[in-house]
Image: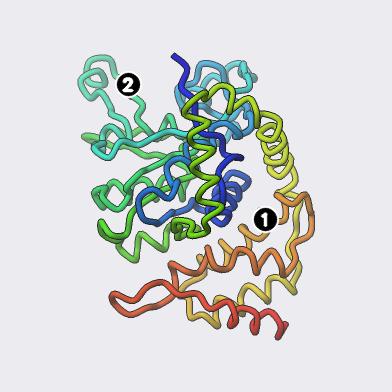
């Protein structure tokens, strides 16, 4: 039975959330996105609907870790050994996908398991892949990420940052590539993430229900049409979805060629310094996000407008604030920073 997802291009509003997701697809090095909002604000619907527009990618045929055939230095031990022996690997194109992480997932389910008994009997490693193996090259979605055990969240963030999943049991170790876009959603009413974990997410977006009468009516209308006939509704926007998929593929192609001028670098550093953000993670993330934003627009030059557009989602969760104080980003202060450059 075919499962239909509400089309990404048919979601009304929530532009900041959609742009943050698309920028991470263009450059996974941004570090993922945390989406916070009350229930019923299309968080899960939007993330899962990305599967319809994600571009194709190259993988080694039959590899359980979805290794990239163009990156021999980032392959799993099986592909690496085969590549050294044969000099080439069979490959094919597959679409990127959205991999769901169950809230009840254990550490072994996430990272995978080593069969120690098999190692002792044969001397050879036997590894049972986990969620991080499935996620390699894809988007890993964690709903209600604030309810996950902290050590699981740490494991996910470490793997996302390093691009490698390392497992060790009884002195036996195994590692494989695990490069993915981490997307977490949460309802702040159910508890917050620790500040140390918040900072590890590249971008953070807060979403709210739309209060405009006409837009709310259109949201209901589209959902009713989709539920009545998912196939027909999806087909009616297939052209628009295809255009966005092509736009994403082109952005992924050009983003490595986009340079950053000293003027933009100065703007980024002045902004993070002015807002009192600790460390350098915010500076690097803002540069990457601004570059991805330019690529999505089909441009090869980063402008102050790109910096202006991404500043809020990069800084809002990193700014110092008092206990129980809500995140607050001052757009007027941002303008004063940009005008002084």
Percent position (x, y) of residue 137? 53, 35
Q: Quadrant of residue 8?
A: top right
- Residue 64 appears in the picture as rendered: yes
Residue sitting at 26 percent across and 59 percent down?
A: 191
- Residue 29 appears in the picture as rendered: no
Mark 2 is surrounded, within 10 Å at the Cα level, by few (under 14), some (14 to 19) or many (20 or more) other residues, namely some
Task: Quarter of the image for the C terminus: give it.
Answer: bottom right
Residue sitting at 52 percent across and 59 percent down?
A: 212
Is 128 rendered above or below residue 143? above
Residue sitting at 24 percent across and 35 percent down?
A: 169
Is 326 rendered above or below residue 103? below
Task: Quarter of the image for the N terminus: give it.
Answer: top left
Mark 2 lies on a secondary structure that is loop
Judging depth in this view, the residue of 54 and 263 nearest the camera is 54
Residue receiving disc 1: 293
- In the picture, measured across the screen, residue 157 lies left or right of residue 308, that is left
Residue receiving disc 2: 126
Residue sitting at 36 percent across and 55 percent down?
A: 38
């Amino acid at each position: 039975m075919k499962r239909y997802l509400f089309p990404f291009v048919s979601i009304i509003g929530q532009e900041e959330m959609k742009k943050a997701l698309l920028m991470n697809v263009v450059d996974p090095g941004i570090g993922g996105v945390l989406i916070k909002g009350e229930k019923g604000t299309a968080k899960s619907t939007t993330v899962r609907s990305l599967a319809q527009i994600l571009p194709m990618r190259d993988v080694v045929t039959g590899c359980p870790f979805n290794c990239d055939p163009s990156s021999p230095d980032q392959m799993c031990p099986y592909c690496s050994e085969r590549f050294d022996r044969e000099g080439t690997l069979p490959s094919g194109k597959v679409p990127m996908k959205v991999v769901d992480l169950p809230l009840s997932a254990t550490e072994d389910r996430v990272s995978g398991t080593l069969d120690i008994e098999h190692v002792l009997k044969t001397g050879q490693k036997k590894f049972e892949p986990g969620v991080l193996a499935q996620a390699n090259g894809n988007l890993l979605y964690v709903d209600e990420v604030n309810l996950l055990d902290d050590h699981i969240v740490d494991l996910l963030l470490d793997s996302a940052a390093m691009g490698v999943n390392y497992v060790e049991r009884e002195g036996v170790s195994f590692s494989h590539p695990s490069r993915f876009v981490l997307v977490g959603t949460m309802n702040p009413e159910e508890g917050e993430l620790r500040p140390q974990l918040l900072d590890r997410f590249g971008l953070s977006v807060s979403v709210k229900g739309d209060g405009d009468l006409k837009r709310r009516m259109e949201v209901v209308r589209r959902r009713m049409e989709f539920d009545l006939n998912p196939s027909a509704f999806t087909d009616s926007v297939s052209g628009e979805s295809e255009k966005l998929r092509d736009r994403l593929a082109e952005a992924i192609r050009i983003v490595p060629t986009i340079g950053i001028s000293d003027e933009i670098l100065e703007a980024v550093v002045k902004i993070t310094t002015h807002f009192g953000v600790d460390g350098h993670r915010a500076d690097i993330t803002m540069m990457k996000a601004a570059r991805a934003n330019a690529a999505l627009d089909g441009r090869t030059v980063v402008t102050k407008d790109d910096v202006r557009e991404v500043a809020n989602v990069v800084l809002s969760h990193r700014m110092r604030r008092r206990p129980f104080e809500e995140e607050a980003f001052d757009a007027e202060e941002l303008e004063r920073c940009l005008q002084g450059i």
